[in-house]
């Protein structure tokens, strides 16, 4: 019985696969999908004057219970809900204003209070939070608590 083994060329198949991958990577810049391009910069944080004007309009809606300030409050809060740089707590407050700023048959306390609470907290919750400065990495750690006695090895 003749047992001859036929050998395929795995090196050739591997070489073709690597050439295909190389061609794909080389074509990415031509397609506009360069891996070296940076992601688009997010839009700037909304100015505090925008939150202040929304706050005043929401308070007017709560106070007057008329269509004009309530519609304006909802229309100002709506696009801010999709802003990528606003924190979730700010969006929760905006959502409350968006949902509660509607004209009701009676201007009861139960209607006014959620709108007023959300409007009063709007400027504080939707404030731009600047990053806090962290201590330098090469600074010696300071002892926490205790008496901070003099270390005799420091002299």
Image: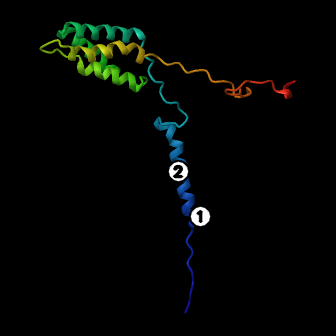
Residue 84: name its quadrant.
top left
Task: Determine whether, in the image, residue 1 is placed left or right of residue 126.
Answer: right
Does label 2 or label 1 sit earlier along the sequence?
1
- Residue nearest the observer in this picture, 74 or 36: 74
Query: Does the CB distance between marks 2 and 1 fall below 8 Å?
Result: no
Quadrant (top left/top right/bottom left/bottom right) for the N terminus? bottom right
Question: What kind of element bears circle 1?
Answer: helix
**Residue shown at 27% from the left, 20% from the top:** 98
Spot occupied by residue 92 in the image (x, y as percentages of width and height): 34, 24
Q: Say above or below: 148 vs 22.
A: above
Query: Which x, y percent locates residue 144?
Result: 67, 27
Judge whether 73 appears above or below 23 on screen.
Answer: above
In the rendered structure, find residue 109 and report the number of the disc placed on it. none
Question: As drawn, which residue projects farthest toward the front?
Answer: 147
Most distant residue in the right direction: 155
Counting from the top left corner in percent of width and height, residue 75 is at: 26, 16
Residue at far bottom of view: 1
Q: Secondary structure at mark 2?
A: helix
Asked whether 29 or 131 is in front, the reply is 131
> What colour scheme has been applied to the protein in the rendered image?
rainbow
Q: Quadrant of residue 77?
A: top left
Residue 130 in picture, x, y percent from top left = 53, 18
Give the camera-side residue of 130 and 152.
152
Residue at x-position 44% and y-position 21%: 43
- What residue is disc 1 on? 11
Residue lying at 18% horizontally and 10% vertically, measured from the top left: 65
- CA gap, disc 2 to disc 1? 15 Å
Quadrant in which the C terminus appears:
top right
Q: What residue appears at the point 41 percent right and 22 percent down from the top-left corner?
A: 86
Read off the residue under disc 2.
Answer: 21
Horizontally, residue 120 falls left or right of residue 14, namely left
Mark 2: few, some, or many residues within 10 Å (few <14, many ≥20)? few
């Amino acid at each position: 019985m003749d047992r001859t083994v036929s050998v395929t060329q795995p090196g050739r198949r591997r070489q073709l696969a690597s050439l295909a991958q190389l061609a794909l990577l080389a074509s990415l810049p031509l397609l506009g999908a360069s891996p070296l391009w940076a992601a688009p910069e997010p839009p700037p944080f909304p100015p505090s004057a925008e939150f202040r004007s929304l706050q005043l309009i929401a308070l007017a809606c709560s106070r007057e219970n008329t269509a004009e300030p309530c519609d304006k409050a909802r229309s100002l809060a709506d696009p801010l809900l999709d802003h990528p740089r606003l924190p979730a707590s700010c969006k929760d407050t905006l959502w409350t204003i968006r949902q509660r700023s509607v004209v009701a048959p009676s201007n009861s306390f139960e209607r006014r209070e959620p709108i007023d609470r959300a409007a009063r907290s709007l400027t504080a919750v939707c404030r731009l939070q600047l990053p806090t400065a962290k201590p330098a990495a090469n600074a010696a750690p300071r002892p926490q608590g205790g008496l901070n006695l003099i270390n005799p090895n420091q002299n």
